[in-house]
Image: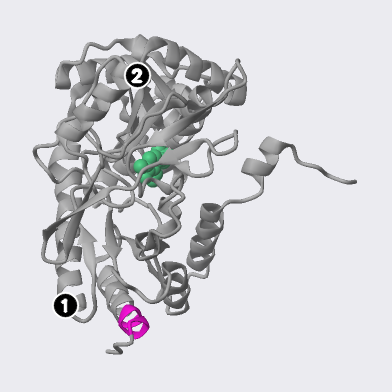
Amino acid sequence: MTLQFSNIGQRIAQGSGIGELMDDLGAALATGDPDIKMLGGGQPAQIPEVSEVWRKRLQEIAADTVASTKFLSIYDPPQGNPAFVKAIASLLRDQFGWDISEENICQTSGGQTAFFYLFNLLAGEMPDGSHRKILFPLVPEYIGYAAQGLDKEMFRAFRPEIEETGPHEFKYHIDFEKLEVADDVAALCVSRPTNPTGNVLTNEEVAHLSGIAKEKGIPLIIDNAYGAPFPNIIFTEEAKPFWAEHIILTLSLSKLGLPGTRTGIVIGPPEVIKALSSMTAITGLANPSTGQHITQKLMESGEILSLSRETILPYYRKKSRIAQQAAHEIFGEKFAWRMHRSEGALFLWFWFPGLPIPTTELYQRLKKRKVLVIPGHHFFFGCDEQDWKHRQECIRVSFAMAENTVREGLEIIAEEVATASGNSL
Ligand code: PLP
């Protein structure tokens, strides 16, 4: 047999940088070596009080014949379970006063699938033969978007402005002076809070982007995987959730501690919701029901809000503070380093200005010492500025793991960066 793959097959079925990296992380974990410091993945922490809520819900469902049949044995409509969709619409209306109803909401198999559908729905080859693109107003952006385009060169991105915000601290901003939204742009897309940096775009930046998108007659996609109202991993109080008729907002149950249920939620214009539901029917018939059934009662009662606000947010905020403090203690003034201001999500984003080796090499050296991080260049897709050295000077470090694991990992990172900088500790 001479097996051949189609163009689309070649694009998405023959591996990707991130796929290899995820295999690497998975293989390291599979060894079961207790010395491995896994600071690379996007795995949410196991928060005991939250895990207990999910265990209780599973017990309630298992004890109820009707609920357990719905949980396991019924195909939902492709848009999602109607009661769950209704609960989300009420929650967002009550919480934020947004003018939305069930026709603005659908479920997908995780946020990741929502992006695959959205990007390929809006961009790529158009009926008139032209090609449209998704524009990221600021990179670094979420690595999981990078290989999702079914058409070639589907993404365009812009380099940010860098503001020094404190000792060893900086923040990326959208460079609106340089941002050009050409006529071939199908949609703008941002994650807020941003994976990998923990950046939370300011209310002004979001309003400005929304204005540009509205004027151009295109959607602004806001990836709210870590945002409000759940899981609410946002440390800056001034950041407000945003909605308008041309916004497509995505939510996920993953960072509530339920990534295994594969539950994403999209809020958008009715014609987009209809299109996504059709894509679900064609590719998968229906979506997983388990996450919807586990959380539906909490969505209806509003308990999801208190769980996010009172348990999940303080848990990650504390972990972020401890990790930042450890970085200051351990890195000190031993070499040039900066950390993006930690405003949300699960990661610290370190920048080593002038690092003599690329972070791909630093990644390999750290891996040899059993510390797994993500080298930063993967997050700079869509932006082909070869002379921009910054792309090879950053790494993403998760702080969701145990405190001593993060600390020991940072100590080894410090040793390797110091050695690479010709400044052995
Ligand atoms: N968007 C962002 C910014 C993420 O970090 C992730 C996962 O880590 C996703 C989307 C996809 O999450 P899921 O498919 O688990 O909902």
Indicate which disc, 1 or 2, sits on the residue closer to the N terminus: 2
Magenta residues, as a range?
415-421
Residue closest to the eye, 31 or 247:
247
Give the quarter of the image for residue 362.
bottom left
Note whether 300 is above or below 315 in the view shown.
Answer: above
**For the C terminus, which image quadrant?**
bottom left
Question: At 22% across and 31% down in the image, what residue appears?
Answer: 206
Question: Which residue carries the number 2 mark?
Answer: 216
Q: Residue furthest right?
A: 1
Residue 411 in percent (x, y) is at 27, 78
Note whether 387 is above or below 277 in the view shown.
Answer: below
Note whether 16 is above or below 284 in the view shown.
Answer: below
Horizontal arrangement in the rendering, residue 407 relative to residue 9 (left or right)? left
Amino acid on which disc 1 is placed: Gly
Amino acid on which disc 2 is placed: Lys
- Helix, strand or loop for disc 2: helix
